[in-house]
Structures are given as structure tokens and as C-alpha cells.
């Protein structure tokens, strides 16, 4: 049971990390240029005082000294897969 809970938490963190990354790129048009595990913090969902439900988390991304920003939305490359176009439309 403990192993299953650990695996579920890892899956949740992976989904949250991917969603966070895609939001940075597709909605806010920037990329953290030095994103590695040491620059990602797992935080309680409710902020400093807690307040989130049991097991809920959020990610804190630190050390944003290196950023690559786009001033205009990205155009999809010719032949981009349909799922990529769907993500861009969602953002």
C-alpha cells in the first residue's frame, strides 16, 4: 500500500510539472533556461500557512536568472502533430 501511494504521488507530481512547464511555454511565452530538479520545490498546496487538502502540493520554481522569452506567440512547425496544435489552442 505504501509503494502504491508513493507511485501515485510521483505521478501527480509529474503531471503537475508537465502542466507547469507547458503553461510557461504556451501561455506565458517563456522558458526557464536552467530548469533541473534542484530548481523545483514541492510545496504544500495552501502556501506558507498550509490550507491545502491532505497530500495536495504545488511547485515552486526558483533561480530564474536564465530565461528565454518570446514576444510573440510561437508558430507551429510544418507537420507538427495534431496534439501539439490542440495544446497551443488551449493556451
Image (cartoon, rainbow, N blue to C red):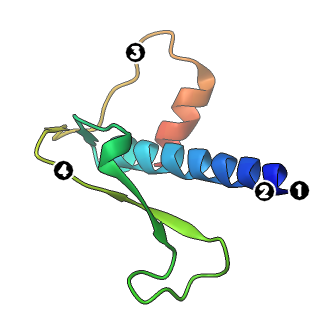
Measure the alpha-carbon separation of dots 3 and 2. 40 Å
* Secondary-structure class at tag 2: helix
Q: Which mark is residue 77?
A: 3
**Label 4 with label 2: CB-CB less than 8 Å:** no
Q: How far is mark 4 from mark 1, CA to CA?
A: 36 Å
Q: Secondary structure at mark 4?
A: loop
Q: Single out the residue that lies furthest toward the left.
A: 65
Q: Position of residue 15 (x, y in %)?
A: 60, 47
Relative horizontal placement of residue 74, taking residue 67 as reference (left or right): right
Q: Quadrant of residue 72?
A: top left
- Report x, y in % for residue 41: 39, 57
Residue drawn at (89%, 56%) of the image: 1
Depth-wise, is mark 3 or mark 2 nearer the camera? 2
Q: Which residue is mark 1?
A: 1
**Is the Cβ of the residue at disc 2 closer than 8 Å to that at disc 1?**
yes
Residue 5: mark: 2
| Element on which disc 1 rests | loop
Residue 23 in the figure: left or right of residue 13: left
Query: Disc 4 marks which residue?
Result: 63
| Residue positioned 13% across, 39% down in the render | 66
Judged left or right of residue 13, residue 29 is: left
Residue at 45% from the left image edge and 49% from the top image edge: 91
Amino acid at each position: 500500500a505504501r509503494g502504491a501511494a508513493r507511485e501515485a504521488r510521483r505521478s501527480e507530481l509529474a503531471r503537475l510539472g508537465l502542466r507547469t512547464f507547458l503553461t510557461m511555454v504556451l501561455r506565458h511565452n517563456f522558458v526557464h533556461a536552467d530548469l533541473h530538479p534542484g530548481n523545483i520545490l514541492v510545496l504544500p498546496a495552501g502556501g506558507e500557512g498550509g490550507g491545502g487538502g491532505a497530500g495536495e502540493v504545488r511547485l515552486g520554481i526558483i533561480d530564474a536568472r536564465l530565461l528565454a522569452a518570446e514576444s510573440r506567440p510561437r508558430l507551429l512547425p510544418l507537420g507538427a502533430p495534431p496534439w501539439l496544435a490542440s495544446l497551443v489552442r488551449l493556451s
